[in-house]
Image (cartoon, rainbow, N blue to C red):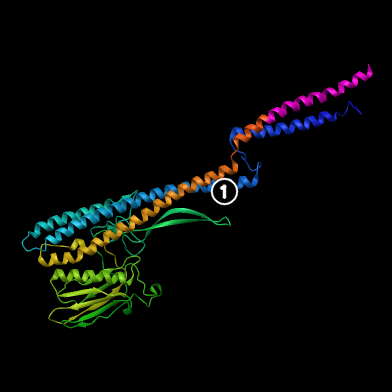
Amino acid sequence: MSSILTNNSAMVALQTLRTINTNMSKTQNEISTGKSVTNARDNSAIWSISKTMESDVKGFKGIADSLALGSSTIAVARSASEQITDLLTEIKGKIVAAQEDNVDRDKIQTDLSALRNQISSITGAAQFNGLNLLSNREGGATVANVVANTGTGAGVMGSGTVNILSSLDRSATGSVTASTISASKADLGMQASAAGAGTDIAASAFSGAGAITAGNTGTLTVAGDTTTTARAGNKVLAGDTYTIGGLTGISNAVRYVARDGDTVQDIASNLTNRLNFEAESAGVKISASLGSNGAITITNNTAASITTTAAATTAGTAGGGLEILKDIDVSTENGAKAALSAIEGLTQTAVGAAADFGSVQGRIDVQSKYVNSLMDSLKAGIGSLVDADMEETSARLQALQVQQQLGVQALSIANQAPQNILSLFR
């Protein structure tokens, strides 16, 4: 049956042409944008995944910048530590030379002082973008003299850590947490410590004081404050000052002010080094050796008995990691001997700092390479999800163009059908 009111063939042809035109528009959009999924309407699931991954790529770009900044900061500190190590090696050579009787110790001391000043200069200049991982405080122990790198403890220089953003970790539930690489600060300054004037720490923090007769030994033990809740477990707080006094012939009390992260063994080690330095400087036959668990064995080789005293107080100001260096004086025989006993420990302090910085910088460089590789992988993954297959799209466009032409032709033929009805009325 033919009808002049309803042309079914034309409607079918028109619907087909509309579908072809819709597909043609979508294909042309893919060609112009290069993407098969440009918005949530195209494919909401793929679009949401790609946007999440794109945000991660943006975040990792920021992480790459953070790692580059961190690597540069650590590199400056490492280089400075290495230079200081070299200078300390030169100082050691001059100290060894000063052990000879037939030398001009005053001139050697002049050279040593110049090298010491150079170390101080390097420490002060070892900053990147204002951050100095080495301490540089000279002229006293007050807060007003702190020019860089104050740690979290009481007046502690060169302590604490610097956290460098290294990664974003996304869990299966979608939560994101930041990971960091921690770089410990190192104190290679020569600032003097200040004894604590705060409250006394419990007597159990430092035990074993008493008389040591001639030719015998005694043991002092740093135990930490076991009675204070904040120091439970023999822990030590920054600013705690441990002092050994009563040593015959040694005018200055031997002391060490704790810094962030110090253990009782660290304190015992530093007290041992200082006691030996003071004894050598004074020409006194008293020596100390380090035991385990914070024990200090004091040997009395004098002709008289000595009585050691021990005390511990709070609120002190820690000295520099190379504090003893400023007290080295090889102009006398005793001073030269004392310097020889101290320089090895100072050198190891600088070597340890350089090694630690080098290790952290190596880890940062590895992480930086990984982050760059990860960003490339994420970008490739996003591309595989949303990028258009241009070969397939080109072939589809050719086919749709032919279909469009045929659709127009079919619609034209269908529109001619009502014209045939006129022949019935001629």
- The spot of residue 35 in percent (x, y) is 60, 38
- The residue carrying pointer 1 sits among few (fewer than 14), some (14 to 19) or many (20 or more) residues within 10 Å by Cα, namely few
- The spot of residue 214 in percent (x, y) is 15, 82
What is the magenta range? 399-426
The residue that appears at 62% across and 41% down in the rendered structure is 39
- Where residue 284 sits, quadrant-wise, is bottom left
- 262 or 382: nearer the viewer: 382
Left or right of 329, for residue 153: right
The residue that appears at 22% across and 69% down in the rendered structure is 274
- 196 or 216: nearer the viewer: 216
- 336 or 150: nearer the viewer: 336
Q: How many marks?
A: 1
Left or right of 174, for residue 5: right
- Residue pointed to by mark 1: 52
Whether 379 is drawn above or below 193: the answer is above
Whether 208 is drawn above or below 101: the answer is below
The amino acid at mark 1 is Thr
The residue that appears at 16% across and 54% down in the rendered structure is 114
- Where residue 153 sits, quadrant-wise, is bottom left
